[in-house]
Image (tube, coloured by chain):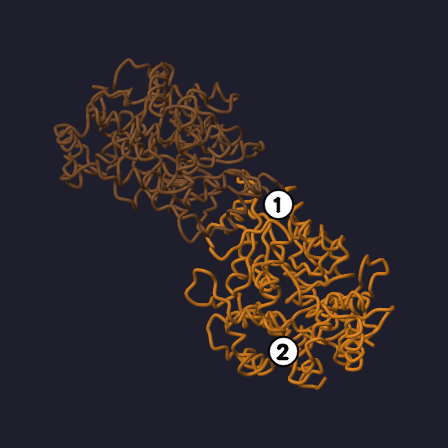
Chain colours: A brown, B orange
Amino acid sequence: MTDQDHADRLARIALTWLVEPGSWAVHRLVTRLGPVATLDLLLDGGAPEDRLRCAVAARIGSADPRAVSAEAMARAERLGARLITPADSEWPVRVGDLHRLVLPGATRRVDTETAPPLCFWVRGGWPLDEALDRSVAVVGARAATSYGVHVATEIGYGLADREWTVVSGGAFGIDAAAHRGALSAGGVTVAVLACGVDRPYPMGNSALFDRIAETGLLVSEWMPGAEPLRPRFLIRNRVIAGVTLGSVLVEASARSGATQTMRRALGIGRPSMVVPGPVTSAMSVGAHEMLREYGDTRLVTGVPHVLEEVGRIGADLAPPARGPDRPGDQLDDEAALLRESLPRRGVVGPDVLAARAGLDIRTALRKLALLEELGLVVRRDGGYAIPPRRREPATPGNARAGGGTGVSPPPTGSPRRGPACTDG
Amino acid sequence: MTDQDHADRLARIALTWLVEPGSWAVHRLVTRLGPVATLDLLLDGGAPEDRLRCAVAARIGSADPRAVSAEAMARAERLGARLITPADSEWPVRVGDLHRLVLPGATRRVDTETAPPLCFWVRGGWPLDEALDRSVAVVGARAATSYGVHVATEIGYGLADREWTVVSGGAFGIDAAAHRGALSAGGVTVAVLACGVDRPYPMGNSALFDRIAETGLLVSEWMPGAEPLRPRFLIRNRVIAGVTLGSVLVEASARSGATQTMRRALGIGRPSMVVPGPVTSAMSVGAHEMLREYGDTRLVTGVPHVLEEVGRIGADLAPPARGPDRPGDQLDDEAALLRESLPRRGVVGPDVLAARAGLDIRTALRKLALLEELGLVVRRDGGYAIPPRRREPATPGNARAGGGTGVSPPPTGSPRRGPACTDG
């Protein structure tokens, strides 16, 4: 990492401390000037808006932003957390779609709380982008009923069982049930927090957070030590909607924060899915309101319906661009089919692969040999797998690849698969 | 009634016996030739379609259609039931909208089971059109859960309590719950049957049918004595959808007949409303399918949502035309407002009326005197009411007005209002 990179990272941290994340004013400056110049401008009192200037002035009084950033980095290192910025390969590009967020009913995009994040703090072994690649948000009421907890657990389990990552907010009720369902299927789950990843809120879920950090990810825009202030939950919600391929609402009372996440999903054109419930339950009132008021909201009753929605989007969208020339670009149809038939994680035998791709075994083996030569599949344990992705060289902001900076190792008891540590 | 009228009625009865109701082939002939000539044509083997000719031939072997008709009339008279045809003033004109029924997904209208009825057999004191004027269908699963029964009862009660008529099919489960809810609110409920009104099916609901006949109506296209054959339920369903201002589905399993009623409602552009339920319940699968598959279906959670739908339609539609010159047509705004402020049933004081119409009491009283003179309101019990409608002179087909032909009298214990017997 260059000095410039390092300065950029520290500036991004300082900016999230100076001004709450989601500010379009800050985001516009960063886009135009870069984070370092933006920070300098703000610290010199040169913010283009009064409101922003006042917010910055209030903060500066309490501490030196650059010292705060350095302290946050040190704290993260001790904790085994890492900072991720758009410069890192594991930055979840999809969150950039928040650029086009226009809330349903609003005529123009809202000027607060909705700009894309400047950085993420991450705790856990998975590369963030990989964990979020096939992900669905499952959100809902804290004061969930046993019905809601049952359904959220089932959906969390079912999605994880089909190798989808379950993203939620780590709250009591529906959030926790969705995380737990995913964990019990041995799947990956990501808790997007409104506070530091070292002090996940609520405390009552701390055992759950420990398990998530071991096999999934804790993610936050706020630096370690940050408190779960009330407005931060709403700011956080746009990330849950933005990083996933779709959001599912299970139970919400009449004016629930979870419906806000759903409106953010709708606002960027992601599938917004709602599980209905008994009309006699106050905890389904918000869910039914969503279905009644937002025509684009889909009623779903379980994982197959959810996959119908996000699967369609997945198929419609082109794969995220990763650069101009990739070896896979020139594959013939049969090789491409085989490659697409590989599980995202784990190993599969050539016969199963051939069957999945609808090819005879001879053709399959020939094409697999070709794919292996291209480095697009690896042979392992008598079967084939997707090769580990090449990572950036170790950086302070990429602790996982940095080796020995305290990242939790894959849990030995992980039921089906561990984090894909790919330092090799 | 002229001899021609009488012959028409007998011919309509014979036609429903010869060919199951809902046949477009028969309906087209009746529209072109009238019922008598249509019957003659069919009895002479002159049906324009092979299928129709065969159906007729099969029936004729068993009895003489004209004798069957006469026997049905006699049986109805003994029972206190009456025949209603489009020539009768109480014919529910709205059922004619079945003319424009095109089933969702179908490119043209279905040629069987969906043509408008030729006649109705009715048991009970209310004029059929009046009972159905403000009516909503509530239908659903026979094997309802306690949740469904609870919701259907609540909706039946709530609609009846707001002076809406609850129409259903008299089946076990949701149908019965909706009827019972309406009855317990002292309201009007109509059971549309797929068999003779003298032998309502199922037997297990016979106490319920007795109560419905006392304060509401039993209605059927099939003559007294007709059996509840399986295909008749589906034929019957179009009437439930057609005579009401909208249909509400409460619980339906995956392939429920109740969803067919809903599709018929959609097919003629009536509000099709569905109550969701727990996704864990097999009895809500069909309801959720409706909501997912038919974009025009509205999710409703209770009576206020239902009234939002049917109220809107009610307001959009012009009042049914009843003839060119009516005294009300020339009313000034204030008088018209007062008239519209009268409850459909019952008496209301002038102060309340004035307040409802937004008029001062002097103006209200002056206009009410004018309305009374025109015969558009009547004074009763210190208040004002809508005058009883003038009925046709007594006919064999209009037993209610015929006096002493066995119509059930209004039950003395009717909680809030009795049938509007208007012989005076």
Q: What residue is shown with label 2?
A: B321
Q: Position of residue B58 (x, y in %)?
A: 55, 69
Going from N to C along the chain, the mark reached first, 1 or 2, is 1
Query: What residue is drawn where x is 24% and y is 21%?
Result: A395
Relative depth, front residue between A345 and A273:
A273
Relative depth, front residue between A293 and B117:
A293
How many C-alpha atoms fall within 10 Å of the one at disc 2: few (<14), some, or many (≥20)?
Answer: few
Query: What residue is drawn where x is 15% and y is 31%?
Result: A371
Q: What residue is shown with label 1?
A: B143
Label 1 and label 2: CA atoms lie apart by: 41 Å
Chain holding disc 2: B
- Residue A168's disc is none
Q: From where the camera sits, is residue A418 visible?
A: no
Badge 1 amino acid: Ala
Q: Position of residue B21 (x, y in %)?
A: 58, 68
Image quadrant where one finds the C terminus of chain A: top left
Which secondary structure lies at badge 1? Answer: loop
Judge from the rendering whether residue A190 lies leftward or rightward of residue B417; answer left or right.
left
Chain holding disc 1: B
Q: On screen, B361 above or below A10? A: below
